[in-house]
């Protein structure tokens, strides 16, 4: 079965980036000059998924606006001869079909995914979080889709983290099937380093079967009073097979300040016009310390 829809939840409060996120959605903070949400939408498109469901909330309308045409801006740029920029803006407006649904209160990621139930329908779907940027030759969600195509079951993205980082992630306990593939047996949300079942962290890319919705409905609020997606997937893993895939690629957790800075530097170094000056600047800064 072909997966046609991607859910991108964007209704969180973004408290770790206050005061920037007081009025600007976290998802629109740019890495160099591209907002985080656009990298993630591009990943969906590059993986063959063009229908995106945003789960939005108060103050987040500008995320949808980002994927609209702005004729008056295009006209000004045309008059100035900035045709390349006009084309680039048009490509953004054409890249995805946007539909959206509101999450009236940020009750957690699991609840946000549940809000998309009617728009997804009774079919498997992808979930992408714009907190996670993944730089890889084959888009991360495409890598998961390849496993789904083979197995027909839910697949979640995994990354091996350091012992002192496990407390920031959902951690998977699983049976290793090959060098990158695991069958998920259990999941723990943000364990203490001494109590972690593994160092395999869940990263914000998922292919989920629609059975997840009825399970999310039954999840009771966990840590921080939020309905956790991890709890729903744990239950799914008890009823059906759930696979974990250690994807290939460099991961940046841009929901975290250090991760955001790292992504900014790494993505700047990938840009032809910035690579040299940024490298020189970094060298100069470091030699001064
Ligand atoms: P986070 O756990 O990073 O929460 O959400 P947050 O509120 O965005 O940020 P902090 O931790 O307060 O700084 C992961 C993703 O899930 C979405 C967020 O928008 C983000 O993309 N989310 C989270 C929702 O859509 N609704 C929620 O209730 C919670």
Image (cartoon, helix red, strand yellow):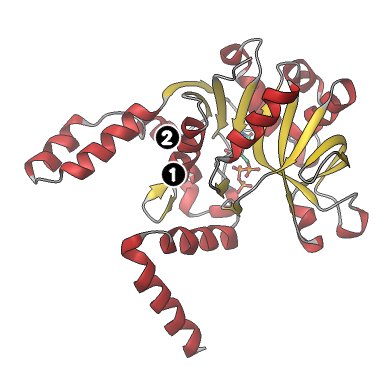
Above or below 6: residue 26: below
Residues at discs 1 and 2 in contact (Cβ within 8 Å): yes
**Residue 49 % position (x, y):** 51, 25
> Residue 174's image quarter?
top right
What residue is rendered at 49% in x and 61% in y? 266
Ligand 1: give its quadrant.
top right
- Quarter of the image for residue 270 reads bottom left
Residue 64 visible in the shown view = yes
Circle 1: element type? helix
Q: Which mark is residue 63?
A: 2
The quadrant in which the N terminus is found is: top right
- The numbered mark at residue 142 is none
**Sequence-earlier tag: 1 or 2:** 1
User: Is residue 112 left or right of 227 when viewed as pictured?
Assistant: left
Q: Does residue 10 appear left or right of residue 61 in this picture?
A: right
Is residue 178 left or right of 24 when viewed as pictured? right
For disc 1, the neighbor class at 10 Å (few under 14, some 14 to 19, many from 20) is some
For image coordinates 59% across by 63% down, the residue present is 258
Under 8 Å from ligand 1: the CB of mark 1? no
Residue 107 visible in the shown view: no
Residue at image position (65%, 30%) is 146
Q: Position of residue 185 (x, y in %)?
A: 89, 35
Q: Quadrant of residue 215?
A: top right
Q: Residue furthest bottom?
A: 288
User: What count of labels does the image hold?
Assistant: 2
| Residue drawn at x 20%, y 39% as measured from the top left | 86
Q: Position of residue 51 (x, y in %)?
A: 48, 21
SS label for mark 2: helix
User: Horizontal and vertical percent for residue 72?
Assistant: 16, 33
Q: Which residue is mark 1?
A: 28
């Amino acid at each position: 079965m072909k997966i046609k829809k991607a859910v991108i939840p964007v209704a969180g409060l973004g408290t770790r980036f206050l005061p920037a996120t007081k009025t600007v959605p976290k998802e629109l903070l740019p890495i160099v000059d591209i907002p985080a949400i656009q990298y993630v939408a591009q990943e969906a498109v590059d993986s063959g998924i063009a229908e995106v469901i945003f789960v939005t909330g108060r103050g987040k309308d500008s995320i949808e606006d980002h994927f609209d045409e702005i004729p008056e801006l295009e006209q000004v740029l045309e008059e100035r001869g900035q045709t390349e920029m006009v084309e680039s803006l048009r490509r953004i407006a054409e890249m995805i079909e946007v539909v959206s649904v509101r999450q009236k209160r940020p009750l957690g990621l699991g609840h946000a995914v549940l809000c998309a139930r009617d728009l997804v329908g009774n079919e498997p779907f992808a979930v992408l979080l714009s907190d996670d940027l993944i730089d890889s030759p084959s888009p991360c969600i495409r890598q998961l889709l390849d496993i789904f195509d083979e197995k027909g079951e839910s697949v979640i993205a995994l990354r091996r983290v350091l012992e002192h980082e496990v407390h920031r992630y959902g951690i998977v306990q699983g049976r290793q099937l090959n060098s990158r593939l695991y069958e998920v047996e259990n999941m723990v949300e943000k364990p203490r380093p001494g109590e972690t079942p593994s160092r395999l962290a869940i990263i914000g890319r998922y292919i989920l079967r629609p059975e997840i919705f009825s399970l999310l409905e039954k999840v009771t609020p966990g840590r921080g009073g939020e309905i956790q997606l991890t709890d729903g997937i744990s239950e799914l893993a008890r009823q059906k097979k759930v696979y974990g895939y250690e994807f290939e690629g460099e991961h940046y957790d841009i929901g975290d300040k250090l991760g955001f800075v790292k992504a900014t530097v790494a993505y700047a170094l990938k840009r032809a016009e910035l690579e040299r000056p940024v490298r020189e600047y970094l060298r100069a800064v470091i030699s001064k310390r």
